[in-house]
Amino acid sequence: MSGLLYKANVLMYDRQSESLWSQVRREAVGGPMTGARLEVLESTLTTWGKWKKKYPQTQVLSLETGYQRDYTRDPYESYYESRKGFFSFFKADPSEEEKALVAGIVLDGEARAYPLELLRKKGGLTDTLEEARLAISFDAQTDRISIRDAEGQTVPHVILYWFVWKGMYPESTIFKP
């Protein structure tokens, strides 16, 4: 991580080219690689308990680092509990929560966000974006989100706060049933 923010999100730093990369925009935003795209890798936002149950052979790095830091305490705990975003760049609609977690997608230049809370409640939903029929599913046992088009192709998504997504994609809409 570079320690720098770009539209309320941390930029990654590439030592080889000395470029700065936006993980949300999936591209370099500074340095010689500006405009180059990143491949989206699937990820899941879940609890340690659910992960360990699904993947019992998972190993974790040791807490014995040689440093005095207390790794059992999350230094961002109060931030996660706060309802306000950090350096929020937009005024949320009264029906929206700035720090709602969403699954964001971009399809043919159109951006949309799907609230995780809604996905957890419904388990799945369908939507149409840029004439593409989408099936969005949520697996409660693993917290895995899957977004597929009508041909069954995976649509890449990223999980983040609504205010960060909206800062990166100001024209984005948030799915409402």
Image (cartoon, grey):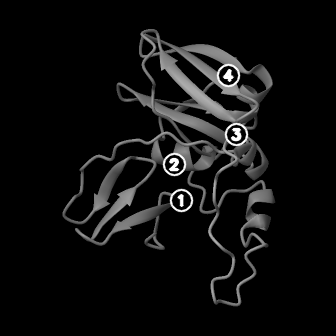
Q: Earlier in the sequence, mark 3 or mark 4?
A: 3
Q: Mark 1 or mark 2, which is nearer the start of the sequence?
A: 1
Q: Which mark is residue 176?
A: 4
Q: Secondary structure beneath disc 3?
A: helix
Q: Look at the image and tell me in which quarter the C terminus lies.
A: top right
**Coordinates of residue 65 in the picture (x, y in percent):** 63, 83
Measure the C-alpha gap from mark 3 to mark 4: 31 Å
Tag nearer the camera, 2 or 3? 3
| In-front residue for pair 53/118 | 53
Whether pointer 2 and pointer 1 mark residues with C-beta atoms closer than 8 Å, the reply is yes
The residue labelled by disc 2 is: 167
Residue 67 in which image quadrant: bottom right
Q: Residues within 10 Å of mark 2 (few under 14, many from 20)?
A: some
Instruction: Check if mark 3's residue and mark 4's residue have beta carbons within 8 Å.
Output: no
Splitting the image into 4 quarters, where does residue 147 fall?
A: top right
Specify which label sits upstream in the sequence, 2 or 3. Answer: 3
Compare residues 27 and 168 and report the one nearer the observer.
27
At label 1, the amino acid type is: Ala
Is disc 3 surrounded by few (<14), some (14 to 19) or many (20+) residues within 10 Å? Answer: few
